[in-house]
Image (tube, rainbow, N blue to C red):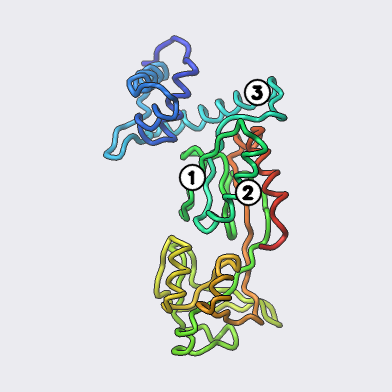
Amino acid sequence: MSDPRPVELTEVRAFVCVAEAGSMTQAALRLGVAKSIVSRRVSQLERAVGAVMLTRTARGTALTDAGRTYYAGGAAALAELEFAREAVGKLTTEISGELRISAPQVFQLGLAPLLADFAALHPMVRLEICFEDRQVDLISEGYDLAVRIGNLPDSSLITRRLATVRAVVVASPAYLDTRGRPSRPGDLTGHDVIVYTHATNQWRFRGAEGWEYVRGNPRLRTDSGQMVLAAGKAGLGVVILPWFMVEQAVLDGDLEQVLPAHPHEGGGLHLLMPPARARIARVRALVSFLADRFGPVI
């Protein structure tokens, strides 16, 4: 049975923070309060709505069905309040707050100077960026923005295309000396290839008569772009990676470009945002900043 008293905003914020952080302890650190206060606020909220919304697990906490439903509305409501606060305070010229960003590991060196420049322009903004190659859930994990490479699945997220990523096929000279150098896309059939864990081993090349599809033998699957690069340099197989990632290895002779006359289908570099976050001034500012810094092809 629900408690007839009004729900407190601090209770909603505590619950949303626990849902995004995954534990009471991490939520308390983010909110800057004691863990006992977070626990009490969540318990009060559960009594107010008349449902158990969090369960304890070995790793922390997990949302129940009721919790997932309430989180969707609660997180959106907090985002709307943040947007309203910015509008009233006219914070578009002096934006503030925290930005949580997810990006692939390959962008660590490339994004660092860009984010440093953005931070210098907006000293009141705090940045938290997680570099990992898995596809994070922006909404449930509490991210404002994600940088993604490749074709995007249909979703409710807001997307902004920044550039086209030039992808190239490469392999180590030692591997090619042993297995032969393909002269046309069809020659790749039967070659060992290194691919991302959730990617297909079917590659698409542009030819004179349209697209040509080939399949290699997936010798290694990994969720790390750096591992794909290292395995290619070690001679484990043929890889497809962005040119910016392999350029130095090609110049150093550690990798050799394969089929340069047959362009591989490139992907896009995108920014993704939850709809509720896309309207917030600091998110809009970062999107605009990055869009200005990237060229049409990288």
Q: Amino acid at mark 2?
A: Leu
Q: Residue furthest left?
A: 58
x, y (%) of residue 198?
Answer: 46, 62
**Residue named by callout 2:** 114
Quadrant of the snapshot with the C terminus: bottom right
Q: Quadrant of residue 266?
A: bottom right
**Residue named by callout 3:** 84
x, y (%) of residue 105?
Answer: 49, 56
**Residue named by callout 1:** 137
Q: Amino acid at mark 1?
A: Asp
Q: Which of the two discs, 2 and 1, labels the residue nearer the N terminus?
A: 2
Q: Which of the two discs, 2 and 3, labels the residue nearer the N terminus?
A: 3
Between residues 243 and 264, which one lies in front from this camera angle? 243
> Is residue 282 left or right of 240 when viewed as pictured?
right
Q: Secondary structure at mark 3?
A: helix
x, y (%) of residue 270?
Answer: 62, 53
Determine the residue positioned at 59% across, 70% down: 247
